[in-house]
Amino acid sequence: MTGAGFAAYGLDGDFTAAFLAARRLADLAERDPAAMDPDAVSALETLLTRNDHARQTQARILYRDAAGALVALLAKGPPALAAASRQALTTALATPGKPRMATAEAVGALPLAGLGGPAVAIPEPVAATTSFAALLAAADAVPGAAVRPAGRSLYAPTTRPDTVLVVKRLRNGESPLGLAREAAWMAYLADVAFPVPCHVPIPLSPAGAPLWDIPDTPCPLPGLDPRGRCLAYLAHTDYFAYPNTPPTQGGPDGPAFAATMGRAAFLLGWLAGRGVVHEAAIPLFHNRVQQGRREDGGLYDWRLPGRLDRWLFSALHPNFGRSGLRDFEHFASLGDRPVRLYRQMGDHLLSLFLVAGSYFRMRDPALVGQGPDGAPVDARHLFDEALLARVLADVVARYQEGFVGEAPAHPPFDAPALARRMVEEMGVDRHMTELLRLDDQAAMTDAAFQEFLLSRGMAAAAVAGLRRGEAEVAIATGPHLGAFNNRTSLPELNETTAAAVAACLAARHDRDRAYIEGVSDFKIST
């Protein structure tokens, strides 16, 4: 069939005709890519960039099939068709709208080599019993120095310059495998030659056991393991220096903040390109209250247009900062699960975007919620839109540089436009409320119901006047990106995430294909 025949077949016609034509092209590209021609590629590109059918309920399937045809040509077609398809995909990924998400999803299925990742053996979580004084002595802690609590962890200065002892305590009911996994990944990554600085703590392993059992640990807290099991390690004093701490509290100024964010993006991309992913750069939830009731644990899926729960709270303490990456228990090897990479890379970029927004809000952390008149707080004056745009562009470029080995010539999105929208949505707290539904209350005891409301900041007197199971309870827990049980108020963030990840994957495919075929002039264009 000629290119004109493909176009006349219906790609530029009504939805049904386009749907059938795109499906046929996708099948043909998969079965016999050499039977395609440049006109077919051009017709598919036009379909994906015009966005004529966005209002149709099945539009995503149409656009996914059209993009899938181009991806099949990119992966298996003759060099000329592969190059034309690559350019068509680049154009589609740079065009806002529903086809952009479908195109990114199709590109996310590209086969890539060398992403299996290392086999890191996780030891049995056995714990050696000792006293807290003996642990301090083993770590060369400063005699008589105060031990400082921070969350569930304890910190103590040591006699080594710029080094602290960290005691990360097990929560009651939590599997100790997580702490054992953290020790194993620390040991593995200590021998990795990172291309940019990334501090890896040194676990203190008593007699080969990964954990300690310290019943007399100070600063007791409710909810911690009664046996006192913990992971102890030595870390640089910058290990807990967060990139979004305001400068007035010792945090970075604008240039230092941008540098820290760029380095974190590079490290996350570099490790992902070697089959190692950090699975919790920050916590991302669609709905925290339903963690125990939903099969997905309430976790956020940026590929869907749902509301993002408590974005500012999630971004407060990211697992990256001045010293590099942190919280090593969340590292994982892709192993035999490379299909998850597309979503995981998106989690990385979305996390970086949210932390970038939080840096400006943290300049006045008390300015949040609603004013005395009930109007949403307007904190847009805290943002430096130009700096935010530069950080967004640099984060994407450095991430791709780490993952591929080369930064894109141009960002696959409009950074100033995204920064503008982020300021509009992240700077005004329009969405503050979540609902504790009757179904969620039914899964709680009366005590858990009251504790939940108190933990969300509800006044004790108000909690005392409520009875579990009587009615839904509205709680001001935001800011959220979107109203409860509704769509995100910042879909541009999801679209940009999808486009940036797809650009990374396509560029990596270009690099691998050029290497395999020995084509020295096969250029990456993103």
Image (tube, rainbow, N blue to C red):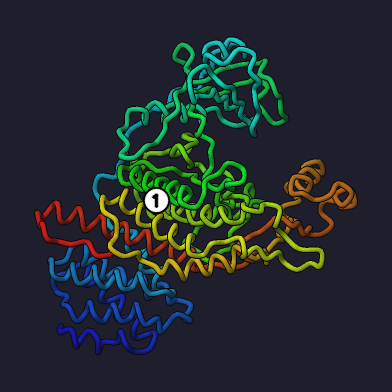
In the rendered image, residue 432, in percent from the top left (x then y), is placed at 70, 61
**What residue type is disc 1 on?**
Arg
| Whole-percent x, y for residue 362 in the image | 62, 52
Please indicate, yes or no, whether residue 287 appears anywhere in the rendered image: no
Q: Is residue 282 above or below residue 78?
A: above
Q: Is residue 292 above or below residue 169?
A: below
Work out whether residue 189 or residue 56 is closer to the camera in this orientation and state it.
Answer: 189
Residue under circle 1? 340
Q: Nearer the viewer, residue 471 or 280?
A: 280
For the N terminus, give its image quadrant: bottom left
487 versus 277 height, above or below: below
Q: Position of residue 481 (x, y in %)?
A: 60, 62
Give the camera-side residue of 70 and 154: 154
Is residue 23 among the parts visible in the rendering? Answer: yes
Q: Which residue shows up at 13% across the image and 70% down it?
A: 80
Depth check: give the residue in front, 36 or 179.
Answer: 179
